[in-house]
Image: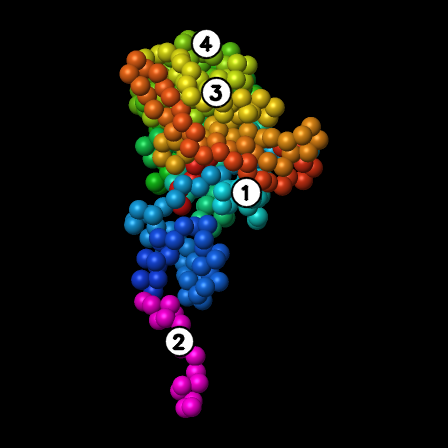
């Protein structure tokens, strides 16, 4: 046997042009990257050394994925940390990231999570790159603020909060995600005479139809960014909504008192109850409070901690498709539900904020 015949055949993957290898990797689900890295040195080097190029290729080829990220608070030490869903059954702590500021505002935009403010008056702001899982500082907010709520619309994040310890003072500052700068000319202050209470403890905010809807511990308010106009919404304020999300410009939240999934249509200015999810909600009676997030481009996801009195190891996860019928009724169909395992030191936690990140 000749020496040439004794040599093993070369790896065909290694001989692929780099551009072709990127195209192949872009079509592989993100959860399979660790496995693919063990198959080929070329794939491993591209995943590790060129993540920005790889994820740009995923986006341009229509292969970007929706990934669930969850801020989880350890109830033993009060620290908030960021977890992400791996596979179908686990929430995994992202190593290397600092603790999240308690009561800070978290907003997902594409592959980034933006973080503003915290429990104390501060001008701190930063973003988390969910491709590399690294922190990148942002320019300081125009005003030191606390008591903040925030959401994203048309390339801008609107942050509403107090610039001092008085609940009387509320300002709106605007961060441009394209230029990564604050827009001082868009800073506005709420009109005199409109009393907005504590947003830090009871505050929630969502965007519907180009307007920002929020509530304090008593009332609900609407802010129109295009006209810098404030008003009250007494119909929305008739329910103690919280941990809400928006799907197709309709607000959804779980009413823990009646164990119902409620919806609010701002155009019709009316409340209703989602039908078809009663059996699902009956399973959550012994769990913690239920958080919600619009996930995967139009589905509603419910999350709630579960476990015993002393130890908690799982988060209940349910993905729901929504259908609006004639007459205004909204039906929900459970597409998938499972328990997501996670480990928190001390064994006591609750979910603070769920986010839909596209990578």
Residue 28 among magenta residues: no
The residues bearing labels 3 and 4 have C-alpha atoms spaced at a distance of 23 Å
The residues bearing labels 2 and 4 have C-alpha atoms spaced at a distance of 70 Å
Point out the frontmost of discs 3 and 4.
Answer: 3
302 left or right of 178 in image: right
Give how far across and how far down residue 83 sits, in percent. Answer: 54, 41
Residue 148 at least partly seen: no
Give how far across and how far down residue 154 sits, in percent. Answer: 32, 32
The residues bearing labels 2 and 3 have C-alpha atoms spaced at a distance of 58 Å
312 left or right of 49 in image: right
Circle nearer the N terminus (1, 3): 1
Q: Secondary structure at mark 1?
A: strand
Give how far across and how far down residue 118 sits, in percent. Answer: 55, 31
Mark 4 crowd level (few <14, some 14–19, many ≥20, 10 Å Cα)? few
Q: Secondary structure at mark 3?
A: helix
- Check contact, mark 1 vs mark 4: CB within 8 A: no
Residue 11 among magenta residues: yes
Residue 210: mark in rendering: none
Location of mark 1 (residue): 90
Residue 278: mark in rendering: 3
Location of mark 4 (residue): 238
């Amino acid at each position: 046997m000749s020496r040439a015949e004794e040599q093993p055949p070369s790896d065909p993957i290694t001989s692929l042009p780099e551009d072709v290898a990127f195209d192949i990797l872009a079509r592989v689900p993100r959860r399979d990257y660790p496995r693919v890295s063990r198959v080929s040195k070329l794939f491993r080097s591209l995943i590790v050394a060129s993540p920005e190029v790889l994820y740009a290729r995923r986006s341009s080829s229509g292969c970007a994925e929706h990934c669930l990220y969850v801020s989880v608070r350890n109830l033993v030490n009060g620290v908030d940390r960021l977890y992400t869903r791996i596979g179908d059954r686990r929430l995994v702590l992202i190593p290397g990231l600092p603790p999240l500021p308690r009561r800070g505002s978290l907003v997902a935009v594409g592959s980034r999570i933006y973080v503003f403010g915290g429990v104390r008056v501060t001008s701190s702001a930063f973003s988390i790159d969910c491709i590399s899982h690294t922190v990148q500082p942002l320019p300081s907010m125009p005003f030191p603020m606390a008591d903040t709520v925030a959401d994203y619309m048309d390339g801008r994040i609107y942050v509403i909060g107090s610039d001092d310890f008085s609940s009387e003072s509320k300002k709106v500052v605007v961060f441009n995600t394209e230029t990564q700068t604050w827009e001082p000319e868009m800073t506005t202050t709420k009109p005199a005479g409109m009393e907005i209470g504590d947003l830090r403890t009871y505050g929630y905010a969502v965007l519907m139809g180009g307007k920002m809807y929020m509530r304090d511990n008593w009332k609900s308010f609407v802010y129109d960014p295009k006209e810098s106009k404030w008003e009250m919404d007494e119909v929305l304020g008739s329910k103690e909504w919280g941990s809400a999300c928006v799907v197709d410009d309709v607000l959804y939240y779980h009413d823990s008192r009646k164990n119902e999934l409620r919806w609010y249509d701002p155009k019709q200015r009316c409340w209703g109850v989602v039908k078809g999810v009663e059996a699902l909600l009956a399973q959550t009676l012994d769990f913690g409070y239920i958080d919600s997030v619009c996930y995967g481009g139009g589905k509603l996801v419910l999350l709630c901690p579960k476990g015993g009195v002393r130890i908690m190891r799982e988060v209940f996860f349910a993905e729901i498709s929504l259908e609006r019928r004639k007459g205004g009724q909204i039906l929900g169909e459970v597409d998938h539900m499972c328990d997501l395992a996670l480990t928190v030191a001390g064994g006591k936690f609750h979910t603070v904020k769920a986010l839909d990140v596209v990578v």
